[in-house]
Image: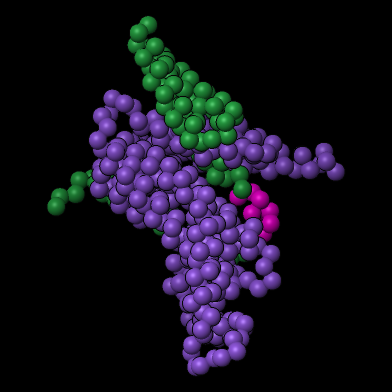
Amino acid sequence: MLFQIFLKTLNRKFLALSDLNASPPSPIKPEGFDPTLKARRRAALKEGWLGIRPAIIPTATWGLVTGIALVKSGLSEQAAVMMTLMVYAGSAQLTSLPLIATGAPLWLIFAAGFIVNVRFLIFGAALQPYFQSLPWYKRFAYGYFTTDMSFVVFMPRFGNAKVRGTQEQRWFFLSMIVIGWFTWQCSSMLGIFLGVMVPDSWSLDYAAILALLGITIPLANSRPMLVAIIAAGCTAWIAQPLPLRLGLLVAVVVGMSAGIWAEQRLNKERA
Amino acid sequence: MNMTEQDLYIAGAIGLLTLCSVVTRASFNLFGHRIPMSDSVRRALLYAPAAALTAIIVPALLPWVPGSNAALVDEKLFAAIIAIVLYQRTRSTIIMIVGGMVSFWVIQALFSFW
């Protein structure tokens, strides 16, 4: 088993080399030095910045609201900072707040965070070919720092690229995720700081629910999705007396089934 | 430093949520082709986040406890409805959050005035 992984790693290293060799050859090529490299890198990083620029204000607003919501929903300043730095996933953080406030079991918090983050599995499956030639720690870093915004900007641009996994594509991605990380962290810290200053009587914990609504309502962009949301909502309302907030899991199962059912029905109607 | 039970609970939650981020974002990059994911699974997973988010929001807006006569409906629900209408009109989540918060304060003031 280990040996297989080792072989695969070797294979990847080899792939990485051939990947480098495949880059367009420059006329003058002293060993290990590519004069066009710097210019190409700079151009790709700048492209990444231009690509992610429209997302900076929305990201910063979200970070700010999330930061405020964290400290206003009962987390201490230190816990909110730790959570922002480590988890780095706004929707999962917001989802966990009502669960933490009611003392839900830890495994359920994990399950809820996982379900809300499951979209990253789908993103990851699509992005994986672009990074597979890298060593494992780089693949890990590119994965961990992937955001919704970077995926949404990256895929339309490089989704149909002839060669997937060029250096230009990765520099472009790198530029976006670095800018995204700083934007999110700075605005979240500002939000945590503001949240500590504002008195509790302003009821800013309600902003956490509004922020969750702000993530959920735009998702309702198709009829099956609307059916899934309504089914999950009704189930969650009825299932409130269940212990340990288990109604959450029941609602997810019912919502998913309803969504698939509505999708199949819609396809039949169209056929 | 003395950690209370509550501190440990929150530290546990943060640790597990970090694990969530790592597993969902990095597993495909790390283990690539070894994770099977059929098209139908992928389509089913599309509905999971929206369902989970809704299931978090609804009990927060419309709480009820069996056997109690406490008011089911309060300013949270009204403000949320206004926020959703604002989003339908403007397609802006920022206006939705700010407008929802302002209407929450206004309705709260009206209720206490009554």
Q: Is residue A114 left or right of residue A18?
A: left
Looking at the image, residue A149 lies above or below residue B106? below
Please name whichever residue, A165 or B52, is drawn nearer the observer in this view of the structure. Answer: A165
> Outermost residue, right direction?
A271
The residue depicted at 64 percent of the width and 49 percent of the height is B44
Q: Which chain does the purple colour mark?
A: A
Residue farthest to the top, as pictured:
B114
| Relative to A241, residue A96 above or below | below
Q: Residue at x 44, y 21 (%)?
A: B103
Look at 30% across and 49% down and name the residue there.
A81
Does residue A48 appear in the picture of this structure?
yes
Q: Main secondary structure of the magenta part?
A: helix
Horizontal and vertical percent position of residue A135: 48, 77
Drawn colour of chain B?
Answer: green
Nearer-the-camera pick, A112 or A209 = A209
Q: Position of residue A89 (x, y in %)?
A: 43, 50
Q: Quadrant of residue B37?
A: bottom right
Q: Nearer the viewer, residue A79 or B93?
A: B93
Q: In this picture, which residue range is highlighted in magenta?
A: B38-45
> From where the camera sits, is residue A99 visible?
no
Q: Residue A14 location, x and y as percent?
A: 55, 86
